[in-house]
Image (cartoon, rainbow, N blue to C red):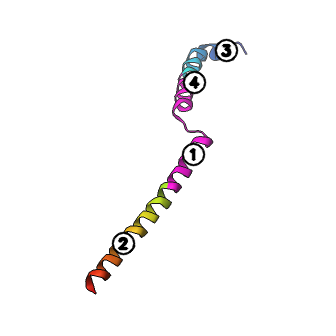
Amino acid sequence: MERRMQALEAAIPDIRDKLTRSETKLDSIEKHGATKADLASTESTLIKWYVGTAFALVGLTSAMAFGVARLLQ
């Protein structure tokens, strides 16, 4: 039993070092990670841009088609 305690006590500094590194990585992830609200906001912004771009392309294509049709008459 005494040997096991000595082995555990010898391993404590290594365990503390690993725990400190894990905490540092976790803090970094929390700082740079996105929340659900951030993702939802980004998704809605992208959808708005896609819809707006689609309408603009339809309008541009229609204008070009009418312009070409008018020139050919």
Q: Which residues are magenta?
A: 21-48
- Residue lying farthest to the right in this orientation: 1
- Which one is in front in this view, the residue at disc 1 or the one at disc 2? 2
- Residue lying farthest to the left in this orientation: 71
Q: For mark 4, what is the residue?
A: 23
Badge 3 density bin: few <14, some 14–19, many ≥20, Cα 10 Å: few
Q: Position of residue 3 (x, y in %)?
A: 67, 14
- Which one is in front in this view, the residue at disc 4 or the one at disc 1? 1
Which corner quadrant holds the N terminus?
Answer: top right
Q: Characterize the magenta stretch by its predominant secondary structure.
A: helix
Residue 16's image quarter?
Answer: top right
Kind of element beneath mark 4: helix
Which corner quadrant holds the C terminus?
Answer: bottom left
Residue under the point 59% across and 20% down: 15
Please name the amino acid that badge 1 sits on.
Ser
Asked whether, in this view, residue 31 is left or right of residue 73, the answer is right
Please name the amino acid that badge 3 sits on.
Arg
The magenta stretch spans residue 37: yes
Which tag, 1 or 3, sits closer to the chain's start?
Answer: 3
Residues under labels 1 and 2: Cα distance? 33 Å
Kind of element beneath mark 1: helix
Residues under labels 4 and 2: Cα distance? 59 Å
- Which one is in front in this view, the residue at disc 1 or the one at disc 3? 1
Q: For mark 3, what is the residue?
A: 3
Kind of element beneath mark 2: helix
Which tag, 4 or 3, sits closer to the chain's start?
Answer: 3
Check contact, mark 4 vs mark 1: CB within 8 A: no
Residue under the point 39% across and 74% down: 62
Badge 2 density bin: few <14, some 14–19, many ≥20, Cα 10 Å: few
Q: Is residue 53 above or below residue 14?
A: below
